Image: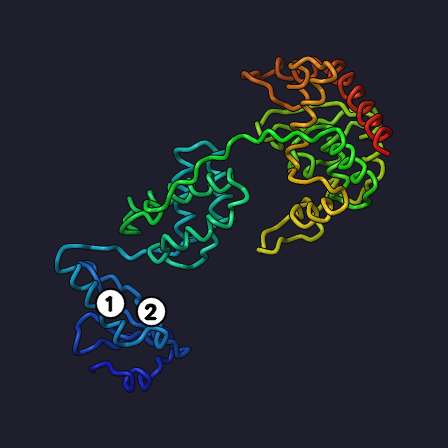
Amino acid sequence: MRLTDISIRQLPLPPKGQKIYFDDALPSFGCRVSQGGTRSFVVQHGYDRRLITIGRYPAVSLAKAREEAKRLLAEQALGKFRPQSIAWGTGVQQFLEHCRSKNRPRTVSDYTRLLNRHFPFGRKRISEISPQDIHRRIDRLADRPSEQHHAFVAVKIFFNWAHTRHYVDENPCTRLVRRAPAAPRERVLSSTELAAAYRTALDGNDTFSSIVALLILTGQRRGEIAALRWQWIDEPGRTINIPSSATKNKRAHSYPYGDAAAAVLERLPRTGEYLFPASRSTSRDGKPTTVFNGWGKCKTDFDRTCRVDDWRLHDLRRTFATNLAALGTPPHITERLLNHVSGTISGVAAVYNRFQYLDEMRSAVVAYEEHLAKLLEQTE
């Protein structure tokens, strides 16, 4: 039959599954009808006669579909084979499987996070993703230059892989300007700013305030504090012991805490294994959550109270190290407290090394807590 708008609307529905009605005027071009009534234009393409979906009718007009079918068939005749692309989600899964065989687990983990978090294209075909689509997603990270750079690198590597698999004709990132990596931040809170943030954290009775208080008092990474479990807290020994599986550098980390941090821990409810459990079991994008992750809104509310401008939670870690240096703490002790240990140590030596400077670390923490207490007194 010759496909027309009238004949397409009148095509009978199959009792089950799908049926294709090919066009007499353009061989290999047809309309696929499902038992539910959906009508889509298709074309058989390539030597293996693969079926390529052009689009759904009437969102795609008959004239446009026929034009696209002619182009695809012409490419076939000229020897320009373009394999059918796949959905974004499927492509990402295949790409990550490919990476697992050649990259370090940490690299695969970073690719997984960056692609899934910043490029949620879902079932959109890889070949349909334009440079503009990528550009819009990258621009949303303008206020986070380091994350923006890493996201751009990850998606460009993904499309390089997709191009080698013939899922795309060209990498849509090629014509985009590569985002330069962010210069290392050097922001250190002044004594007045540190006191304001610390006082706000102590006065708050919410989860975020308690996390900020511990970040100020311990200098640890925010993700490692948010994921703390009660079983890692040695309260009699006033020590926190984080296993290697939960640290950024995959090295077990033990560090002491003082009276001020102990007071923060005392005020926390003990309702489960985590100090800071998630308020709900799934995030807004449907992913399961176990620990606190409401950083954005809580930080905004916190800033409104403490009135410190242009600071990030990670700046507290740099501020911690700077203050320890000012108090005369030896660099290697500060490195231990921050878990910045160089070299590879394993076995019994690793366990020994982990606790080697515990007394010196404790002295540094006590001195720092006393310094914070004085700052609060001076800024009252």
The residue that mark 1 highlights is 68
Q: Amino acid at mark 1?
A: Glu
Tally the numbered discs: 2
Residue 139 in the figure: left or right of residue 24: right
Amino acid carrying label 2: it is Gly
Query: Which structural element holds mark 2?
Result: strand
x and y, in percent, of residue 248 in the image: 58, 31
Quadrant for the C terminus, please: top right
Cα distance in 3D space between marks 2 and 1: 10 Å
Q: Which label's residue is closer to the chain start, 2 or 1?
A: 2
User: For this view, does 272 lie left or right of residue 267?
Assistant: left
Which residue, given by chain and number where applicable, does mark 2 sit on?
55
Q: Residue at x 23, y 55 (%)?
A: 82
Q: Residue 239: give its label.
A: none
Q: Foreground: 260 or 329?
A: 329
Which quadrant: the N terminus? bottom left
